[in-house]
Image (spheres, rainbow, N blue to C red):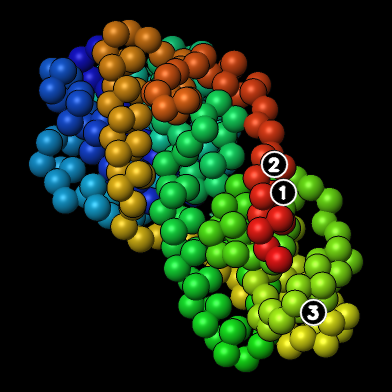
Amino acid sequence: MKTIGVLTSGGDAPGMNAAIRAVVRTAITLGMNVKGIRSGYSGLIHDDVIDLDARSVSDIISRGGTMLYTARSKSFMTEEGMMTAVETCKKHGIEGVVVIGGDGSFRGARDLSVRGIPCVGVPGTIDNDIASTEYTIGFDTAMNTAVEMIDKIRDTAQSHHRCSVIEVMGRHAGYIALQVGIATGATAILVPELTVDLESVVKKIIAVEKTGKKHFIIVVAEGVGGVDKIAAYIQEKTGIDSRATVLGHVQRGGNPTVRDRVRATQMGSAAVHLLYNGVGNRVVAYKKGEIVDFDIYEALNMTKSFDEGMLEVAHETAI
Ligand code: F6P
């Protein structure tokens, strides 16, 4: 391949810029040209394509967000939209595309691949909810941001003897909630993968209160939601003053951690090597300490199980 494209799609994640940088510089090192496709697949529909060189990606390794912008494109999902995307690739001489994003973005990569433009997916989402990989770019930074915020909330909860019910991101997944809950010593962690039992949460708070504990952190994944109602319920049943906080998009921004920068660089580089060797319709993944890759169809059919053992550890230590 002489020319490849790179795009970011779906929700942005800290470390996407580091991945773009790795894609651009690896491709140039291997003698290829790189085009940046802006605002995800929508850039292929609206012909928003720019030339990228080694200097275009200077000073972005440390920055959150994505210099290529991102979007969730509805028009790409039609046959007409996909054919327009293929035409845009041909017009710019783009022979393969690196797609940085989540499962939805990988489905787009599969659709472009079957229409003659080989694509390689790089997992980028703060949710860490892609089955084919143990790690997605942005997860570590988002968790560290959430922990920093909850540590601050703990100070005030502790001062007032309150219960703080805190929503972290994860519309369909509780992976952020699980690890953030452990790292902040939460009394309870509520995730969409498991049945929510508020009565047990109340029982636990009452039991722990009897041992002298006076402030409580309850971490709730976005997919469970209803933190206001949960806080009101806890207050009603325990008599403990309770407050709800939704952390929201603060978790999606900020400078990526070392882990995110390094994984993003490794995965971006691996994706380019695949295209360089003429291999498309693949996704890059992190498994057992190594960067590997899978067929996109295979990857999209994989399922990820929730680590209930880790939740048990959280439960046993939050007393
Ligand atoms: O997929 C990442 C994520 O941040 C989810 O945790 C969240 O539910 C969703 O994106 C929110 O998306 P947006 O802010 O783009 O509507």
Nearest to the observer: residue 129 or residue 34: 129
Question: Which quadrant holds residue 318?
Answer: bottom right
Left or right, 204 with reference to 56: right
Determine whether 30 is above or below 229 in the image.
Answer: above
- Spatial CA distance of label 3 from label 1 is 21 Å
For label 3, the crowd category at 10 Å Cα-Cα, with few meaning under 14, some 14 to 19 and many 20 or more, is few
Give the image location of residue 25, x and y in percent: 17, 31
Which residue is under mark 2? 309
Give the image location of residue 75, x and y in percent: 55, 38
Nearest to the observer: residue 261 or residue 100: 261
Left or right, 200 with reference to 94: right
Which residue is under mark 3? 210
Residue type beneath disc 1:
Glu
Residue type beneath disc 2:
Gly
Q: Residue at x 66, y 54 (%)?
A: 314
Q: Secondary structure at mark 2?
A: helix
Q: Residue at x 59, y 57 (%)?
A: 182
Question: Can residue 155 be seen at all in this image of the molecule?
Answer: yes
Disc 2 + disc 1, Cβ < 8 Å = yes
**Quadrant containing the C terminus in the rendered view:** bottom right
Nearest to the observer: residue 183 or residue 212: 212
Which residue is under mark 1? 312
- Which of the marked residues, 3 or 1, is nearer the chain's N terminus? 3
Q: Secondary structure at mark 1?
A: helix
Q: Residue at x 60, y 64 (%)?
A: 185
For label 1, the crowd category at 10 Å Cα-Cα, with few meaning under 14, some 14 to 19 and many 20 or more, is few
Confirm if mark 2 falls within 8 A of ligand 1. no
Give the image location of residue 117, x and y in percent: 40, 16
- Which of the marked residues, 3 or 2, is nearer the chain's N terminus? 3
